[in-house]
Every structure is written in C-alpha cells, then in structure tokens.
Amino acid sequence: MNYKPGICTFCGNGCGHMLRIADGRVDGVFASRNHPVSQGRLCVRGWNIHELLSTNQRITSPAIRKNGILEKTTYDEAISVVMEKLIGYAKSSPDQVAVLASPRSSNEENYLLMKLARSVLNTNNIGLDSESGHRASMDVLKAGTGMPGMMGSVSGIMKTGFILVFDMDITHQNPILGSEIHKARRAGATVVTIDSRKTQIAALSDHFLQTRPGSNKMVLGALAKIIIDDNLMDSEYIQKYTSGFEGYANLLGSLSFGDIESKTGIDVARLREIAHLLAKAGSAMAFYPSGISGLDADMIGYLFNLFLITGKAGVNGSGINPVTGLNNLQGGYDMGAAPDLLTGFQSLDDEGVVKKFSDAWGCKLNPKKGKSPCEMLADPASLPKALIVADHDEGII
Ligand code: SF4
C-alpha cells in the first residue's frame, strides 16, 4: 500500500488529500491533516474523487469519427490526422481555429496549450469556459488593486471579524470554504448573507438579507449610501488610496430610500444595521461567485467600492474574494489562456510583450487579439472550422 499527496481537483478550494495506491490502482482517498487550506477536511466529493479514475466513462484511447462513428485508433494516427488538418487551417485561415482550454487542467498543461495555439497554430482564439464571471472579477480587481485574484486567504477567515457571503451558495459550491466561514462564526465573527435564495449559509448566518431577484446591486449601493450619510467612512484610507470619491458619493446621493425599500424588499433599518456592522468591524472579507454563475463587472465594482470606503481592502486581511466552482480557473488565466492576454496577464496590445514572447519561442506571433471559443460558438457567423477542446467532459464531444 502506497500513499501519494495531491490536491482535490474538483472545486476552487484546492483541499489537500492523500491518494491510496494498491496493485497499481488508486483505491482510496484520505484527507491531508497538515494541508494549510483544508486542515484534515474533505467534502463528500473529495472523499470520492478517486472513483473518477476508475469509471468506465473515461476516454482511455484516441478515436477518429468515421462515417459518424467514433472508432478507436493509435496515437500516431490520431496525432498525424489532427495536426495535418490543424496546420492546414493555421496556414490558410488561422482565425478559424479555436482552442478551448480548461479550468480543470494544470498550469503546465494550459501553458503548453496556449503556446501551441499561438506559436504553432498562429491563433489567439483561445479561452476558458466559465470565462465571463471570472474575467469580470479579474478586470475589476486588477484595475482596483493591481492584482487580478483573491485579496485574502482561506487561512485569514478565522482572523476576520465580519464576513459577507454575497449572492452565492457557498456551502454547496465550495463546502470546505463554507465550513471555514461557519467555524469563524462559531468563534465570534459576524456572518452576513445577501442573496435572493435562502441558501444553507443563509440559515447559518447572523444576518440574512433576502433580496428581490435583480436588486443586489441596489443593496450594495444602499449600504454604501448609509455609510456615507452616517459618516462612517474611513476618510484617511479614502484620501490615501482611492480617487473619484466625490463622484461616487454624488451618484449614491441620488438613490432614494423609498426606491431602495420597494425594489430590494429590505427595510432601511435592517440595511443600516448591516452597514454599521461592516463599517465598525476591525477587518472584513466578502466572498462572491465567479465563473459561470459569476457577477457582472458593475456589481463587483459596487462590492469593491463598499469595501474601499470602509477601509476594508488590502489591510488586516480584509478585501473581496472571488470563489470559483472549478479548480484552476485562475491558473488558466495566469498562464495566458485568453484571447488578449499572454502569460502573467501581459497584454497582446503591447508590442514589447509580443516581441518578448516571439523571441523566447523562436517564432513570429500573431499580434491581433483573438476571440474566445465561447464568443465564437455563440455567433453563427464566426463558428470555428477547427476547435481543440482540452480536458472537458465527454458530453461536449
Ligand atoms: S471542497 Fe472542493 S477541493 Fe475540497 S474536497 Fe470538496 S470538492 Fe474537493
């Protein structure tokens, strides 16, 4: 019996596990006690993840569709057929080739796929599925902080006084993260859930604002308005780290409390209670969904501004944190699996960046921004002639 350490690749939590290997097969999973994120915990999906290795639904050999039927073949034949066609397209119409990278792939795999697309197939039509919500989150965070990822860490949850779970079913999507928030509440943190659904975390929270569907942005604006009206902002922080506060305050000034109550379904007194708790907390974290169920950029901007005016962004572990349902969505972007970004969020618009990568890879890169496969597939006029799909479920084939 042999045990190998690894990371659960199901959701974005990244829990540590030990895989048990017997007779050349992985036949069990155990929680890794020392893992800094999960600390000996796995959710029900994590305890059973080894079954994915032995399911008879795995694709275990290459196949080529002939007369409508997938027929097994050798790797040599499959690679030569695919590359002949792809290189033909790359020479004649690289804009019609697309690559769908995967949030389930490792960083190394996504880097190689991105390099294949750009340096061999001459296309920037590469992207990840679940891209919209996470891309919006990255763009807001990069513009606001310079870093396109989480502002806090899982280990910081227990040190936080105020936790906001915003518009996400966190105990189902990321159960171990949900359990850490529940643990922090038992240790004294105030947990607030804002959602139109009555989720499990809502029932476990100190305060649950059940909003009317479509009104969450107004709730965030209302909380900020109350903080400004009641003079609870962190003026020193605003002065030191932000710009454009007056315009933002004027915008919120146009909100009427009558409208807020009728559109959100929440009493202003209740909103005031939450606004005061946030403003007076020593530190605060917000968790919101990214990926396919993610928020739009405007909504994330409202959430970020709420934390900025209370001085709860980037100090004492405070800040807003996107939570992905898929394990390596962020890593895929880090590696450059995007139509306009190279590795490390370096922009294709920058000639120096394109030259640097061209020199390093020994080829001339196409500098024209591409389209993501999701964009191409959504528009009948831009359907790709060839699509590489990496690391996705069999159903997509
Ligand atoms: S919470 Fe996510 S990463 Fe952790 S065991 Fe469950 S599915 Fe795996």
Image (cartoon, rainbow, N blue to C red):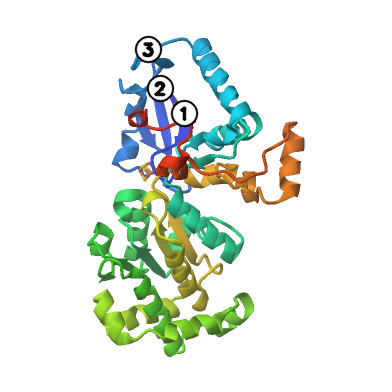
Depth check: give the residue in front, 158 or 284. Answer: 284
Residue hosting label 1 = 4
Classify 92 as above or below 168.
above
Furthest residue in direction front, as rendered: 381
Taking 108 as reference, is 192 left or right? left
Residue 126 in view in this figure? yes
Q: Nearer the viewer, mark 3 or mark 1?
A: 3
* Dots 3, 1 in contact, CB < 8 A: no
* Dots 2, 1 in contact, CB < 8 A: yes
Locate the C terminus and report the quarter of the image it occupies: top left
Q: What is the CA distance from the residue labelled 3 to the residue labelled 1?
A: 35 Å
Q: In percent of the image, x 61 and y 46: which residue is there?
A: 369
Classify 397 as above or below 125.
above
Residue hosting label 3 = 71
Q: Amino acid at mark 2?
A: Ile
Q: Which mark is residue 192?
A: none
Classify 276 as above or below 92.
below
Question: How far across and down, in percent of the image, does residue 243 sit?
Answer: 60, 77
Q: Nearer the viewer, mark 2 or mark 3?
A: 3
* Dots 2, 3 in contact, CB < 8 A: no
Q: Secondary structure at mark 3?
A: strand
Q: In percent of the image, x 60 and y 30: which residue is there?
A: 116
Question: How far across and down, in percent of the image, does residue 312 sit?
Answer: 50, 72
Q: Secondary structure at mark 2?
A: strand
Q: Secondary structure at mark 1?
A: strand
Q: Amino acid at mark 3?
A: Glu
Q: Which mark is residue 21?
A: 2
Dot 2 or dot 3, earlier in sequence: 2
